[in-house]
Image (cartoon, coloured by chain):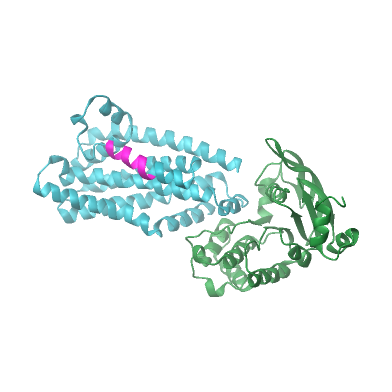
Chain colours: A cyan, B green
Amino acid sequence: MRMITFAKRNFKEIVRDPLNLAFLFGFPVVLLLLLSAIQANIPISMFELDHLTPGIMVFGLTFMTLFSATLISKDRHSSFMHRLYTTPMTSADFILGYTLPLIPIAILEGVACYIFAAILGLEWNINILISVLFIIPIALLYIGIGLLCGSILNDKQVGGICGALLTNVSAWLSGIWFDLDLIGGVFKNVAYALPFVHAVEMERAIVSGNFENVWIHLLWVLGYATVLIAVAIFLFLKQMKRQ
Amino acid sequence: MDSIRIEGLSKQYRDVLAVDNLSLTIKEGELFSLLGLNGAGKTTTIKMLSCLSTPSGGDAYLLGKSILRDSAYVKSFIAVSPQESAVAPGLSVHENLELMCGIHGFTKEKRCAKINELTALLNLGGVIKRKAGKLSGGWQRRLSIAMALISEPKILFLDEPTLGLDVIARSELWEIIRALKGNITIILTTHYMEEAEALSDRIAIMKDGRLLTCDTPDAIKESTGENSIENAFIKIVKGAII
């Protein structure tokens, strides 16, 4: 009950910020539109809708990190959090309350991407629904990074690290905008040692129906998500005790 | 009956002793003010009593329950209205009150009744649908106090509740605090001497973490030979009488 109440509050705080909505729904839509326009004039297989849409959708999820980290960081430095610390709320209420409301937001972002892609000509099939379901582990990955950053950084640092650095790292090392084989070497090895490219390739594999390729990518994503969430919980509890 | 019994409470932050061996008792239903200059240890004391900060030494008993051993239970009957307005800025006034009801596990009926009661008590009807973050400082403080009262606390900590408010907003908050007096134990910290004098049953004056005096406003004035708490406070803190 306490956790659900707190989760509802966090959901409202996030979706009532117009800037959040612009980033979450507007940005991927604009990217889809622009890249589809490029594709229409100069055909590139990278920007075909069934290849591009899963990538853009995953890129849109990087904003989950920014939202969760900003909310946690602002709360942490506010008297509002001190008030909540003096109530019977437990650490599990706090952690789940910050995590759970972002999952439906992530699913909505994915659905919005696919609806817009369908308007642009993406052919619908059952794999797209499966792909939307597989947003959940990816969302957990980005929420985990957000919980971690929100627990240790102030909101200005969150803006820089989650808003600028993470979105760039995630974009460059995910194979959304260019084929990683074009660069190869250390760059490609680093990219495949991180979870972002696996998240994109997992979604692409699902959309194209290559399910045998899904599981290895899912393991990478879930592995990173588990470790990041565990570290985030440890750091959140540590700062909670310190405060 | 004692509502709060503090026994040798201390708080050490690295090389700073913020609260030094504080001992006192506060009776049930009493409005007790903690006065002191910045860094006197008032907020640290409140943080320890409200289980936000662990003491370095000593203990305190709230309605007989230790803040060290029974902190979860203590949290069920205390409430804090922190120094800054502790509201969720993106939620409306009504939603903020609902949030606190949910956190305390109220049923739908109790939630409605409690929100109506506090809306009337703190006169929040005119702003009930407005976003808390868009309210003036005075209205945010009212909301903050209403949120603290949701849980029907037996002990309420008000940390500088009128700081930064204009004269009218301050006088209105005084009326609200007076209305609460007697029903619950209130521990108030303030920099405004006239506020402490007007509202308190007893006043404690702290300096550098130590308790200098603790008595009724009249007794403090009498012992210092001053006609106002402000002058008595200055005399005591400057060390003329300790």
Quadrant position of residue A188? top left
Q: Can residue A230 be seen?
A: yes
Camera-nearest residue between B185 and B110: B185
Which residue of the protein is positioned furthest toward the top in this rendering?
A185
- Quarter of the image for residue B28 reads bottom right
Left or right of B148, for residue A209: left
* Vertical position of residue B227 compared to residue B26: above or below: below
The structure residue drawn at horizontal position 29% and vertical position 44%, both measured from the top left corner, is A59
Q: Is residue A168 magenta?
A: yes
Q: Give percent across and percent down for residue B197.
A: 78, 65
The secondary structure that most of the magenta stretch takes on is helix
Where is residue B51 shown, x and y percent of the image? Answer: 67, 47
Camera sees residue B3:
no
- Give the residue drawn at x 17%, y 47%: A49
Residue A167: percent from left, percent from top: 33, 42
- The quarter in which the N terminus of chain B is drawn is bottom right
Q: Is residue A59 left or right of residue B91?
A: left
Residue A80 image-quadrant placement: bottom right
- The number of callouts visible is 0
Which span is picked out in magenta?
A163-172
Q: Residue at x 22, y 32 (%)?
A: A180
| Residue A51: in magenta span | no
Q: Position of residue B204 (x, y in %)?
A: 80, 55
Residue beneath the point at 60% across and 64% down: B141
User: In the drawing, does residue A241 fall left or right of residue A126?
Assistant: right
Q: Nearer the viewer, residue B94 or B73?
A: B94
